[in-house]
Amino acid sequence: MMQKTTKFSYRKQLKNNYLLVNSQPGHVEGLARLQREVFPLLSEDEILKAHHYLKHIEVFPEGQFAVLNGDEVIGSTTTVRTRYMAEPHTFLEASGNLVLSNYDPEGEWLYGLDIGVSSRYRGYGLGKALYRARQELVRHLGLKGQITVGLINGYHKMQESMSPEEYVDQLKKGTLNDPTVSYQQGIGFAIKGLIHNYCSDPTCGNCGVVLMMDATHVI
């Protein structure tokens, strides 16, 4: 697939006058606040802070997105361009120790490191809009698609009765619903595998599901 190098600048008006744009330096404090709201139990060593977001904007500005309600950051996603990570890996490895040190301008995949919407603004389609923006970037850059690792945030309710492997197998079959991964499946991601010790978050048993979306898929 031919890679495109023309500048990508994103700005889209959403319902209720919310605005989806590429993240800017003025957004980083709001991005950091949102990160703590969305991932309250994530290890302090893995939580993204304002200085990390500044680095992301410096390294890969096209791949950082924020949803705004006026000056308030109410949704966001962080991505990095990379080669396909087939082997088990951790969030710190995927994020280049939180500063995208693994960014590869020749990488063929867009790796979605996180995505989140403030609890006060859920139900307005903001998550889907963020995934759609990522998919538009995939096509603009001529990449193969998106990769992400979805945290199995419903697993803590089932961990006494089944292993992570059994849980994910039921997600594949559609016989179980996970608040994160089932949503990602619903918009077009396919489950490719399970990673143990991806991050330090008891909600998901420290596990994540490798998910992939081809560039041709329309969200």
Image: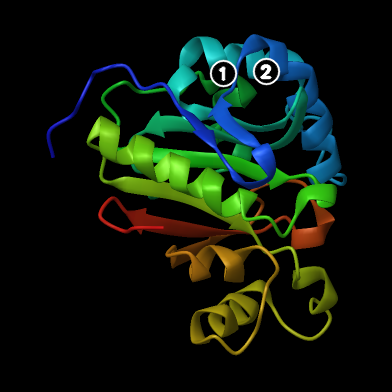
Is there any visible trace of residue 173 in the rendered image?
A: yes
Relative depth, front residue between 129 and 57? 129
Left or right, 46 with reference to 77: right
Vertical order, 27 against 141 (above or below):
above
Q: How many dots with numbers?
A: 2
Residue projecting furthest to the bottom: 175
Residue projecting furthest to the left: 2
Tell me the amino acid under the disc marked 1: His
Relative depth, front residue between 148 and 45? 148
Q: Which mark is residue 56?
A: 1
Residue 180, given in percent of the width and then of the height, sits at 66, 63
Residue 158, given in percent of the width and then of the height, sits at 79, 79
The residue lying at 74 percent from left, 63 percent from top is 153
The residue lying at 76 percent from left, 32 percent from top is 47
Q: Secondary structure at mark 2?
A: helix
Image quarter (top left, top right, bottom left or bottom right) of the C terminus: bottom left
Vertical order, 196 against 60 (above or below):
below
Cα distance in 3D space between marks 2 and 1: 6 Å
Residue 145, given in percent of the width and then of the height, sits at 32, 47
Residue 161, given in percent of the width and then of the height, sits at 79, 86
Left or right, 198 with reference to 142: right
Label 2 with label 1: CB-CB less than 8 Å: yes
Tell me the amino acid under the disc marked 2: His
Relative depth, front residue between 58 and 69? 69
The residue lying at 33 percent from left, 39 percent from top is 138
Q: Bin the neighbour count of mark 1 within 10 Å (Cα to Cα): few under 14, some 14-19, many 20 and up.
A: many
The residue lying at 41 percent from left, 21 percent from top is 9
Left or right, 69 with reference to 88: right
Which residue is identified by label 2? 52
